[in-house]
Image (cartoon, grey):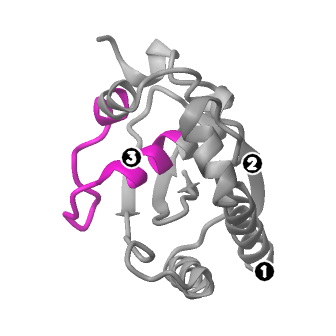
Amino acid sequence: MTLVLGVDPGVRACGYAVLELGKNIKKRMKVIYANDPVANRQNPNWWMFIDSLTEELEDIFNGFNIKQVYCECPRVMGGLRGKAAAGRSDIIHLAHHMGIVAHVARMWDATFTPVEVAQWKGNLKDAVVWERVGRPFPPEDSAGNLIKKHALDAVGIGVCGFYDTDMRNASLWGKG
């Protein structure tokens, strides 16, 4: 079994999931730790969020022997939502977040792999992704913490990155 960290970087919150995964895709997968902190909703100082992101990652690496990290790549979205995000420089912030994740992984001798949205999620709606991720996993991590939306995405990113698959893989996510 390998300990894998899945990361869903966000402008206002980042989701994390430490997963215990085996080479056999059919074996039981386990969410060891999942967190969905909201660190930047009311604090306009983006640098404070960067500092808390770094601290959170260092705490995770201190607590677990992570060997592989899979992090969602930022992308520019289309439509009005994408234009509004581009106007706020969100893509630049997300790229910084991914760089911090890569840097901390490297400091701890873990392999860092960026995962494209199209690679793991495609065009599936969030509700569909969260329902599929919830099939093979209980709704809590091993400490009994409820797995929330950004952490659910982190689970999907970590699992799809590790097994080099996507959300359409029925053998991974089960039927539904």
Left or right: where does residue 43 sit relative to residue 138?
right
Q: Position of residue 27 (x, y in %)?
A: 43, 33
- Of residues 48 and 66, the one nearer the viewer is 48
Mark 1: which amino acid?
Answer: Met
Q: Position of residue 56 (x, y in %)?
A: 51, 80
Secondary-structure class at tag 1: helix
Give the residues drawn in magenta, as a range: 132-156
Secondary-structure class at tag 2: strand
Q: On the image, numbered disc 1 is attached to which residue? A: 107
For the image shown, how many numbered marks are present on the structure? 3
Q: Position of residue 33 (x, y in %)?
A: 38, 64
Q: Residue at x 56, y 88 (%)?
A: 48
Left or right: where does residue 159 sit relative to residue 163?
left
Q: Residue at x 68, y 50 (%)?
A: 86
Q: Residue at x 47, y 61 (%)?
A: 16
Q: On the image, numbered disc 2 is attached to which residue? A: 114
Q: Position of residue 102 (x, y in %)?
A: 76, 66
Image-quadrant location for residue 9: bottom right
Mark 1 or 2, which is nearer the eye?
Answer: 2
Q: In this view of the protein, can residue 23 be seen by the observer?
A: no
Q: On the image, numbered disc 3 is attached to which residue? A: 152
Q: Does the magenta segment cover residue 120?
A: no
Q: Tag 1 or tag 3, which sits nearer the N-term? A: 1
Mark 3: which amino acid?
Answer: Leu
Q: CA distance from mark 3 to mark 2?
A: 17 Å
Secondary-structure class at tag 3: helix
Q: Residue at x 77, y 67 (%)?
A: 99
Q: Tag 2 or tag 1, which sits nearer the N-term? A: 1
- Of residues 130 and 134, the one nearer the viewer is 130
Q: Are marks 1 and 2 in contact (CB under 8 Å)?
A: no
Mark 2: which amino acid?
Answer: Pro
Label 1 packing within 10 angstroms: few (<14), some (14-19), many (20+): few
